[in-house]
Amino acid sequence: MTKTVLDAKATSELLNRAVAEKGFEYRDPNSPTAGGTGCKYADNEGNPLCIVGHVLHYVGVDLLKADLTGSVEVIIDLPMVPDHEQGDMTPTGANGVLWQGGDKDIEFTVDAFRLLEIAQTEQDGGTFWGPAVEVAEKEVGV
């Protein structure tokens, strides 16, 4: 099992990579405000859909092999990433959140996870991806 640790700077770069790939004014068509039924990390073929799904894909998580029935658990009273039931994030101690999916373990520092949580919440609410990342970066101070 390979383990990768991502801090806020690295996570910000990955979020911005997703924005560059999809477009500053991209809106997840699965978000309820875009007429969808709810955001998902990936489609049935393992292709990333939401902004967090793209980040996980970039670091090598096989979204097709990830636990699609798991839940998100966080530490230090951080809220859950809403509307996501794929993959499994579990507490790793006082320093971060661990995604266990497929053959990869990805540990996000607390600030890195806050970036993901804020960007995902903004995206789930229908915000374009570019502004969603900007809000997250501003709130976390990246």
Image (spheres, rainbow, N blue to C red):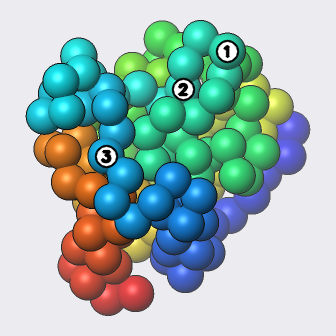
Query: Do tag 2 and tag 3 residues touch (Cβ < 8 Å)?
Result: no
Query: Do tag 2 and tag 1 residues touch (Cβ < 8 Å)?
Result: yes
What's the residue type where badge 3 is placed? Answer: Arg
User: Which residue lies at the image location 54% right of the left edge and 26% below the top edge?
Assistant: 42
What's the mark number on residue 45?
Answer: 1
Q: Quadrant of residue 133?
A: bottom left
Question: Which quadrant, please, contains the N terminus?
Answer: top right
Query: Do tag 1 and tag 3 residues touch (Cβ < 8 Å)?
Result: no
- Mark 3 nearby-residue class (10 Å; few <14, some 14–19, many ≥20): many
What's the mark number on residue 62?
Answer: none
- Using the image, determine if residue 126 lies above or below residue 46: below
Q: Looking at the image, tell me whether mark 2 or mark 3 is earlier in sequence order.
A: 3
Residue at which label 2 appears: 42
Residue at which label 3 appears: 27
Q: Alpha carbon of mark 2 to alpha carbon of mark 1: how far? A: 8 Å
Residue 97 image offset from top left, x and y in percent: 49, 52
Q: Quadrant of residue 37?
A: top left
Q: Alpha carbon of mark 1 to alpha carbon of mark 3: how far? A: 21 Å
Residue 65 image offset from top left, x and y in percent: 72, 19
Q: Alpha carbon of mark 2 to alpha carbon of mark 3: how far? A: 15 Å
Question: Which quadrant, please, contains the C terminus?
Answer: bottom left
- Mark 1 nearby-residue class (10 Å; few <14, some 14–19, many ≥20): few
Q: Nearer the viewer, residue 74 or 40?
A: 40
Number of callouts: 3
Q: Looking at the image, tell me whether mark 1 or mark 3 is earlier in sequence order.
A: 3
Q: Nearer the viewer, mark 2 or mark 3?
A: 3
Residue 107 image offset from top left, x and y in percent: 61, 55
What's the residue type where badge 2 is placed? Answer: Ala
User: Which residue lies at the image location 59% right of the left edge and 58% below the top edge?
Assistant: 21
Residue 126 image offset from top left, x and y in percent: 18, 45
Q: Residue furthest bottom?
A: 141
User: Which residue lies at the image location 32% right of the left edge and 88% below the top edge?
Assistant: 141
